[in-house]
Amino acid sequence: MSRTLFITGVSKGLGRALTLGFDALGHRILGCSRDQEALETLARDCSDRVSVQAVDVRDDAAVAAWIQSAVEEAGAPDLLINNAAIINPNAPLWHLDAETFDRVIDINIKGVQNVMRHALPHMIKQGRGIVINLSSGWGRSTSPEVAPYCATKWAIEGLTQALAQELPSGLAAIPLNPGVIHTQMLESCFGSGASHYEEASAWAERAVPFLLELGPEHNGQSLSVP
């Protein structure tokens, strides 16, 4: 059965890999990212089932407009995947300036809530839908020099589990640890060591069918891609 998915951060990394993977299975994807050029490249690599738009998830008005247009085009999402996130440059917490810290918080936490604020009323109205908020291993543990990122992913775990207690029957909210995957974000932390980990395209081959199996019975569970 074909599903409708809204996915943020689709221009690269896990978001791009998920979009290509869901598209290959015939699903309908409405995606967003800040990078217009990368979105154009993605669109050329996808079928006409994929619609993408340049949106900064920090901008609540822009998110509202995107969600409204996406719902008008394809209906409310069956799966809402909040993937858009950034990581801080490796540094002790007291070395990071306020602008860097704020940017991580604004994208990784506030951006997720902006998307949920405008998408959830449509999902609740249709009586079904799964919200998948990408967390991290660093949302359940910590490492030095990535404290702001850890803080946001711990926040995503709590935010999502609290949301799960509020949702009506038929819906679910799930914090998802994708695992350690070779992406530009991982390279920023691990440098050349990132190449020792699985590529996003290979990860998506496992992640896509796993995500499609999630349902209301998984509401509030902190899950990891197997």
Image (cartoon, rainbow, N blue to C red):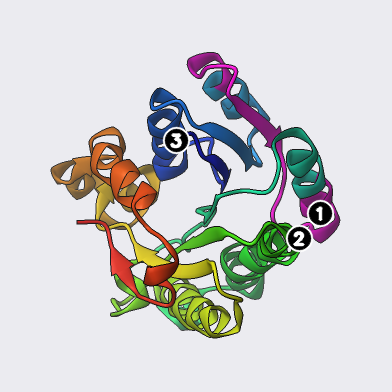
Image quarter hosting the C terminus: bottom left
Mark 2 or mark 1: which comes first in sequence? Answer: 1
* Front label number (2 vs 3): 3
SS at circle 2: helix
The type of residue carrying mark 1 is Ala
- Seen at 23% across and 35% down, the residue is 202
| Label 2 close to label 1 by CB (< 8 Å) | yes
Q: Is residue 87 above or below residue 98?
A: above
In depth, the one of 70 and 193 nearer the eye is 70
Residue count near mark 2 (Cα–Cα under 10 Å), binned few <14, some 14–19, many ≥20? some
Q: Is residue 183 above or below residue 186?
A: above
Q: Is residue 205 above or below residue 222?
A: above
Q: CA distance from mark 2 to mark 1?
A: 6 Å
Query: Can you identify the residue that label 2 sits on?
Result: 118
The type of residue carrying mark 3 is Met
- Look at the image and give the residue range highlighted in magenta: 43-65
Query: Can you identify the residue that label 3 sits on?
Result: 1
Residue that protrudes farthest toward the left in the picture: 196
Mark 3 or mark 1: which comes first in sequence? Answer: 3
The type of residue carrying mark 2 is His
SS at circle 3: loop
- Seen at 49% across and 74% down, the residue is 156
- Seen at 57% across and 66% down, the residue is 104
Query: Can you identify the residue that label 1 sits on?
Result: 64
